[in-house]
Image (cartoon, grey):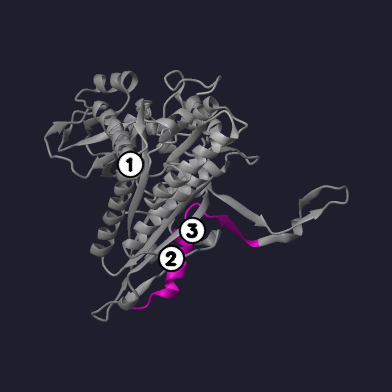
Amino acid sequence: MSKGVISKDEDYSQWFNDLIIKSDMAEYSPVRGCMIIKPYGYSIWEKIQAILDQMFKDTGHVNAYFPLLIPKSFFSKEASHVDGFAKECAVVTHYRLKNDGAGNIIVDEEAKLEEELIIRPTSETIIWNTYKGWIQSYRDLPILVNQWANVMRWEMRTRLFLRTSEFLWQEGHTAHATSEEAIAETEQMLNVYADFAENWMALPVVKGRKTANERFAGALDTYCIEALMQDGKALQAGTSHFLGQNFAKAFDVKFTNKENVQDFVWATSWGVSTRLIGALIMAHSDDAGLVLPPKLAPIQVVVVPIYKHDEELDNIAAYVAGLTKELKAKGISVKFDKRDTHRPGAKFAEYELKGVPLRVAIGSRDMQNGTVELARRDTKTKETTTQEGLAQKIESLLEEIQNNIYKKAFDFRAENTIEVDTWDEFKRLLDEQPGFLSAHWDGTSETEQKIKEETKATIRCIPLDNKQEAGKCILTGKPSTQRVLFARAY
């Protein structure tokens, strides 16, 4: 990376922050805790959004939009939900500013709202208030709605792309006639997230359930995908919640079922956010910059010409035009960087920093020999290859790079997932070799809380594919029937 940027082994947090700034993905905003997502960072979000949006539509969902501002009274209708978000809510109390006569703009105290409005931290309350008017009969169900939006949670400690006061996300909110349908929806969307993480982000994830302590506020059950970052900390990459009938009861959303009996509707909600970009960075990148999986890279291939005069550039450009056409026909994004303000070496460093998966360098001698130089970002290896069949070779290489990035992350997780049976070993490994610690737990919230207080490690999930085995809780020694995954987390 460029001079002055710290190594991830020296200070992982600073490395992460520097990398975002230096690679031109985002910057801090004038508003505390918020960020400005710059075009390069936003283009990754656009790719994430487009892919997931299609996956949602392929599973029968449609998009809608609900208001940013939610009446405060809505939050008091679902007690556990408001308790979960009360400390993070930004509140709108007035609707007008005025000039104080001395050139200062102040809040007009006479423009106080009759009821305060909450900037949405999540939209369950306003959506379920709306669904009351949409649902009367089983014929109106299911409702399978998703919303792409921004939300605000007034965070005290913020970090770009991981925990900001305002962030972008999608939130699915579905309504069903039976608990079985709602649970099936919750599981289906968890699988959609896992599919996206592994096959697009090249990020191996563990699918599991959250404990009661870690559940979404107002949910009966929370499913999640958990990923391991290169510093050994876990990151929750997506959640899907079975809400039962809690919100339907809070907002009196009933329907007449097929037996002509009234019942409360069953609900789910699910979401992922711009935190996925943080996961991409932390799971794959290195001290030279971003390492982006080809399927999400804004620029998959960059072509850098090496020339001494315009005639050589024109000759190279004519060849690159044909190559670009072939690659675009395969759905591959290409940038031909013929800026004369930057030397080739500076361009190489720039695209390495930005994580472009494949760089093609071509000079006058290459044109004479019918060759190009290919440089992979994931392995930092170079090769000289023939121009013949180059588009096909590039397509194959991008697939190979995608798979290799996944394998590297998968192997890292495997090496850093350890079964632990004693309390002393548990505490030692958390400090010496952070990662997923697979350990027995007695199933009580009290023990879970005590472990968290003493070690800052939380139960990330109870894996869905868990094998059942007899054991003893690492802290209390009480009987346990299965291991759970502990880790320190973001």
Q: Is residue 126 magenta?
A: yes
Could you tell me how far apart the alpha carbons at marks 1 and 3 are, in whole angstroms? 64 Å
Range of magenta residues: 114-137
Locate residue 419, reporting x and y percent. Answer: 20, 27
In the image shown, does 330 or 277 lie closer to the viewer? 330
- Relative horizontal placement of residue 419, taking residue 316 as reference (left or right): left
Task: Give neighbour class at mark 2: few <14, some 14-19, many 20+ (Cα, 10 Å).
Answer: many
Q: Is residue 127 magenta?
A: yes
Task: Give neighbour class at mark 3: few <14, some 14-19, many 20+ (Cα, 10 Å).
Answer: some
Q: Is residue 72 visible?
A: yes
Q: Is residue 165 visible?
A: no
**Who comes first in sequence, dot 1 or dot 2?**
2
Q: Which residue lies under the disc numbered 1?
A: 389
Q: Amino acid at mark 1?
A: Gly
Q: Amino acid at mark 3?
A: Ser
| SS class, disc 1 | loop
Vertical position of residue 470 compared to residue 7: above or below: below
Write down the quadrant of residue 226 in the picture: top left
Nearer mark to the viewer, of 1 and 2: 1
